[in-house]
Amino acid sequence: MAIVSSRCGSLAEHYAPIRIQGTEARTFLQAQLATDVKDLTADSARLCAYLSPQGKVLALPIIAADGNGFIALVATTLRDAVLRRLRMFVLRADVAIDSADDLVVHGEFLEPAEHTGLSLPALPVSGHSPLRIRWPGNRELQLLPAGSTIPDAGFLGDWLAADIEARLPHVDEAITDRFVAQMLDLDRSGVVSLSKGCYPGQEIVARAHYLGRVKRRLGAFEATAPTTPGTPLFDGDRPVGEVLATAAGSPDILAVVATDSAGTTLQDEAGIVYCPGANGADGTK
């Protein structure tokens, strides 16, 4: 997909911001997330994993330092659930967690000349007030005052298509708490840490890593018709995975599939065919 230069649009349907503040906010996040954030500074943000005790991905927040605390960008459909779950574990800690209703998330496709290679989970912060976070694919996430509008009916679809091209998983209400972290390649991208202190799901993540029991991985496919996240996929009569991410107007999808079906043409119950894309389930090209 060709990158569109200097094009902006709203991502409010995709991301919602929340604030985590207080003197113990960093310690709290370090204990809750599967990603190491203890050394997160104002000049970088981090794609993080929030897991259940069973090691399944509840959300993939983007965390950035913000004054005396942090801003987290979470899937819009998961914002309230993430708020409730995080608040459950605050107990007596000096931590306040609230929706940032005064802010809205926008995105921008940058000029190709501005491109710099990015390595997850670290994401450079190129500015504050507004917060600007570099995103893979010559793009930038921007946190603007609520009420800021940049109308572009096709922007979100193009943004999601660029995420799929970059093999960036996104977890929303349709697929939360469905996949163990390694199934989304979060171990390969460094989003999940195998060396930090305890966090929910750590035992499952470590067991899957050291025993090599990951039977499904992230894969790129092209669908012959529109489909939706959560759609079961079959290799013949055998269920082998499900759709993870789609983009309006694009045939490209991400799916979590059995590794032995990585290069195989799949189908769903509606008869839609899924042909292997540029990247197989093992991430090779």
Image (cartoon, rainbow, N blue to C red):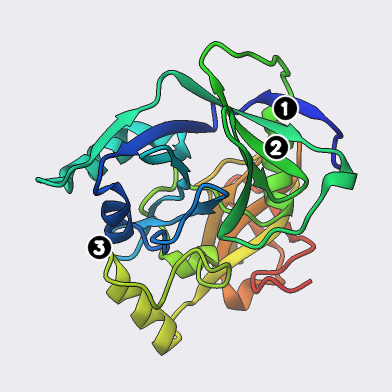
Give residue 191's position: percent from left, percent from top: 50, 63
- The residue indicated by pointer 3 is 53
Contact check, label 2 and label 1, Cβ < 8 Å: yes
Give residue 182's position: percent from left, percent from top: 48, 70
Q: Quadrant of the N terminus?
A: top right
Which one is in front, 15 or 197?
197
Residue 225 visible (yes or no) = no
Using the numbered discs, state the Cα–Cα distance from disc 1 to disc 3 in whole angstroms.
36 Å
Chain-order first, disc 2 or disc 3: 3
Assign a secondary structure to mark 3: loop
Query: In the picture shown, does residue 215 fall above or below 152?
Result: below
Q: Residue at x 25, y 45 (%)?
A: 23
Q: Amino acid at mark 1?
A: Phe
In the image: residue 85, left or right of residue 66: left
Tell me, for residue 159, which label it has, or none: 2
Using the numbered discs, state the Cα–Cα distance from disc 2 to disc 3 in whole angstroms.
31 Å
- The residue indicated by pointer 1 is 155
Contact check, label 1 and label 3, Cβ < 8 Å: no
Q: Amino acid at mark 2?
A: Trp
Q: Residue at x 88, y 45 (%)?
A: 112
In the image: residue 198, left or right of residue 144: left
Query: In the picture shown, does residue 70 fall above or below 232?
Result: above
Assign a secondary structure to mark 2: helix
Q: Residue furthest bottom?
A: 211
Assign a secondary structure to mark 1: helix
Using the numbered discs, state the Cα–Cα distance from disc 2 to disc 1 in whole angstroms.
6 Å
